Amino acid sequence: MGTQVGQEVARDMGTQVGQEVARDRGTQVGQEVAQGRGTQVGQEVARDMGPRFPQFQGEWFVVGLAGSTHRKMDRFLLNPFIAMFEQNGNSRLKVSYAMTRGHHCVTWSYVLVPAARPGSFWVDRREEPEEVQVYDTDYSVFALMLFRRQSGGQSILRVNLLCRMWMIQTQVLDKFVCLVRALGLSDNNIVFPDLTDWSPHLGTCQR
């Protein structure tokens, strides 16, 4: 069921599968997300995230991005990169990223401060407050993370698709597409890392 990231799946985001997912489920999800109620999926994750919080830690591969400021053409600027989540005391999460650019390793990090609802956080020490929500996850295969912030009077949305391996299962891709379209974003706002001249055995740079 899995397809290699950046191959047919990444090129065919406007296919019938994505359209049917968006039509059948996206509208209701989008209304609930827009109204701030949180969908049934989000509510279940919030209830479950507390006791299973430690299972979310560890290494994830960022296999897909979507956002109001992203464009498909950005794919050539986005190399494969990893995210490491580590509990940093008082239930805070330190998030560290590492991306290879040529022969250089680019790293950056921030700390997530827990919000009142389990599974929701605020980015610490950011000029523009950003809310981060673990929208959906099974802890062992995939996670969907939703980022929201205000900038210049506009709402900036971003969705990260994380997987434990460099592989996107079909049902996981459906979840990603559904959420992206429910947020009012289009296929053109979806970006997959450029895997040209890259293969899993080459790995990524370390933090």
Image (tube, grey):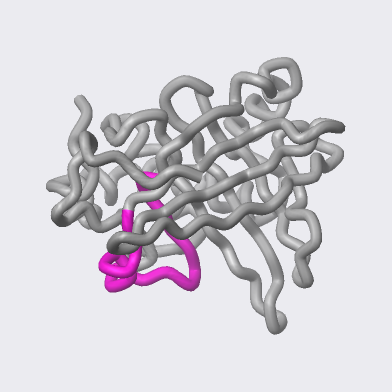
Residue at 67%, 21% in the rendered image: 54
How many numbered marks appear? 0
The residue lying toward the viewer, choosing from 158 and 77, is 77
Q: For the magenta stretch, what is the residue range? A: 62-79
Tell me the residue at 65%/59% (across/down).
148
Identify the residue at horizontal 21%, vertical 52% (top origin). Answer: 195
Q: Residue 125: horizontal and vertical position, in percent? A: 80, 61
Q: Nearer the viewer, residue 206 or 2?
A: 206
Quadrant where the image shows the N terminus: top left
Residue 172, picture quadrant: top left
Regarding residue 84, the answer to whether it shows in the image is: yes
Which of these two is toward me, 12 or 56? Answer: 56
Task: Please indicate, yes or no, whether residue 15 appears anywhere in the rendered image.
Answer: no
* Residue 97 vertical position relative to residue 87 in the rendered view, above or below: below
> Residue, x 42% and y 69% (percent of image)?
70
Q: Outermost residue toward the front?
A: 103
Extreme top residue here?
51
